[in-house]
Amino acid sequence: MTVDSSLDIVAKDLTAAISRLLRRLRTEANPTELALSQMGVLARLEQVGPMTTADLARAELMKPQSMGVILASLEQEGLIERQPHPTNRRQILFVLTETGVAVRTSHRAMKRNWLVGALGQLDPADLKALVAAIAVIRQVGDS
């Protein structure tokens, strides 16, 4: 086995492992069963603050029409609301409602609680190896 083929195997295995962990986190933390795209919009609004439909569409790499459908569903659920744009009366900003903030807070807590529980089931040697791997994974992500 060559170094290149070994790296290819590591890359495939790492991608599969991270994907599986992310899927599990999404499953554990989404009792409301919001779509991934809806959760992405809520997260973006929480991180960035008020945004227009066009800004959200660009940030989430989708068409404004598709974003409009997502925003309408989130608005109907009471998770976001419209605000007038402070400098352009023709534009509308979307912001999280108190309910939207509560959903985001709840989802984060559920993810963290599940992960803490899963980590607590590891034997000490595996936990130590995982802690060491975090720095390496971060380094790869930053490269």
Image (cartoon, rainbow, N blue to C red):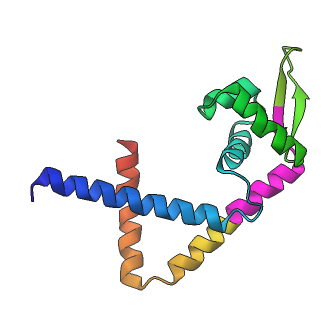
The residue depicted at 86 percent of the width and 20 percent of the height is 86
Give residue 93's quadrant in the image.
Answer: top right
In the image, is residue 139 above or below residue 63?
below
Percent across and percent down for residue 107 are: 71, 61
Give residue 37's quadrant in the image.
Answer: top right
The residue depicted at 51 percent of the width and 77 percent of the height is 119
Front position in the image: 88 or 41: 41
In the image, is residue 3 above or below residue 67?
below
Count the numbered circles shown: 0
Prevailing secondary structure of the magenta residues: helix
Front position in the image: 143 or 14: 14
From the image, which quarter does the C terminus lie in? Answer: top left
From the image, which quarter does the N terminus lie in? Answer: bottom left
- Is 12 within the magenta? no
Give residue 7's quadrant in the image.
Answer: bottom left
- Is 100 within the magenta? yes
Percent across and percent down for residue 54 are: 71, 24
The residue depicted at 65 percent of the width and 72 percent of the height is 113
Percent across and percent down for residue 129 are: 35, 73
Q: Say left or right for 62 vs 78.
A: left
Percent across and percent down for residue 71 are: 79, 37
Q: Say left or right for 11 vs 114.
A: left
The residue depicted at 58 percent of the width and 74 percent of the height is 116
Q: Say left or right for 98 vs 133.
A: right
- The stretch in magenta equals 94-109
In the image, is residue 127 above or below residue 88?
below
